[in-house]
Image: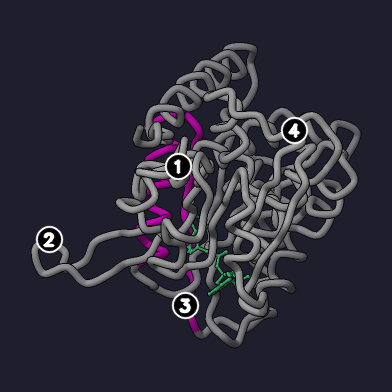
Amino acid sequence: MPAQIIDGKKVAEETRKQIREDVEAWVAQGNRRPHLQVLQVGTDPASTTYIGAKTRACKDVGISTGTTHLPDTISPKELKKDIYKLNNDDTIDGILVQLPLPNHLSSHDVIESIDYRKDVDGFHPMNVGRLAVDQPTFRSCTPAGILELFKYYSIHTKSKHAVVVGASNIVGSPMAIMLSRENSTGKATTTICHKYTKDITRHTIDADILIVAAGQPGLIKAEMVKEGVIIIDVGINRIADETTEKGYKLVGDCDFDGLIKKASWITPVPGGVGPMTVAMLMKNTLLAAKKSIYPDAE
Ligand code: NAD
């Protein structure tokens, strides 16, 4: 039997509907409408597309938003000054610096300069650290969205072997933390693979749940997994396609057509993890506005 499709678009729409209701209830109580401010350094077209999707999502759920456009020649000092201004602006709840940044800027430095109480991407060391010790935190949106998908489809991670391919700070690493903790969301035995892992098939073949975030189209093929595996394909890769209007199409890191015959569940690309990432950003922005994570902070 072919795998069942994990429909991230549908789950994200339902999640956003709930967030929209929560935002309106919050505003109806006399509170200011939550606000997310995005900073874009330069004019990278992929970044512009992602920001467009986030801006539309904000409008859809009733979160106010704005984008600060900065030149790609901006100095680290000037960029931090802009971030400090947003940190000190009481009308702004969430701050997101769109990555990647031009090479002369350190994303670590830039992220650390964001007030962790407004870090709705969940990338600040304070939030990552709290994630690692099971404290309430802004959870990185992509892995948090994947856990929401598991919840929606009653896919249990407890005592399973979860294998995460990719160890970046924004996806693979927080995903592995969330899965491996002995808390309500994780409880999985977790293996993390990256580009230095020798023979990744040794690990993927044993996975009950395989989460792939490597940015390598076609990396995972049917012969690398066992029957009944649950596949979460995080990859978003543009590959040339003359038959499309844009001249490219989006594919994940997994050979969908081969894997669908062997897996029990699988996410498509697009329409799988991506829409959930955006929905979780909306959720984090509302949490920031309500000061739900850091209630006692000044
Ligand atoms: P990254 O480049 O920062 O990290 C890639 C990771 O994959 C690294 O840890 C690297 O060691 C590992 N890797 C690379 N080649 C490998 C190989 N052959 N075998 C094993 N590991 C390998 O990327 P990222 O920011 O984590 O993003 C990964 C992918 O996910 C990209 O395609 C990106 O576009 C996509 N992405 C999607 C969403 C979403 O919402 N769906 C969100 C973020 C990123």
Mark whose residue sits in front, 2 or 3 = 2
What is the span of residues highlighted in magenta in the rendered image?
46-72
Mark whose residue sits in front, 1 or 4 = 1
Residue tagged 1: 263
State which tag comes first along the sequence, 4 or 2. Answer: 4
Of the 4 image quadrants, the one containing the C terminus is: top right
Please state the quadrant of the image where ligand 1 appears. Answer: bottom right
Residue tagged 2: 244
Q: Residue at x 63, y 41 (%)?
A: 144
Please say if 151 is above or below 28: below
Q: Position of residue 159 (x, y in %)?
A: 76, 36
Q: Position of residue 215 (x, y in %)?
A: 47, 68
Q: Measure the alpha-carbon separation of dots 4 and 2.
A: 42 Å
Please say if 265 is above or below 117: above
Residue tagged 4: 158
Residue 13 forms part of the magenta stretch: no
Mark whose residue sits in front, 4 or 2 = 4
Say which amino acid is labelled 1.
Ala
Task: Name the mark on residue 71.
Answer: 3
Kindly check if marks 2 and 3 are in contact, taking CB atoms under 8 A apart as contact. Answer: no
Q: Measure the alpha-carbon separation of dots 3 and 4.
A: 47 Å
- Asked whether mark 3 and ligand 1 are closer than 8 Å, the reply comes as no
Q: Measure the alpha-carbon separation of dots 1 and 4.
A: 19 Å
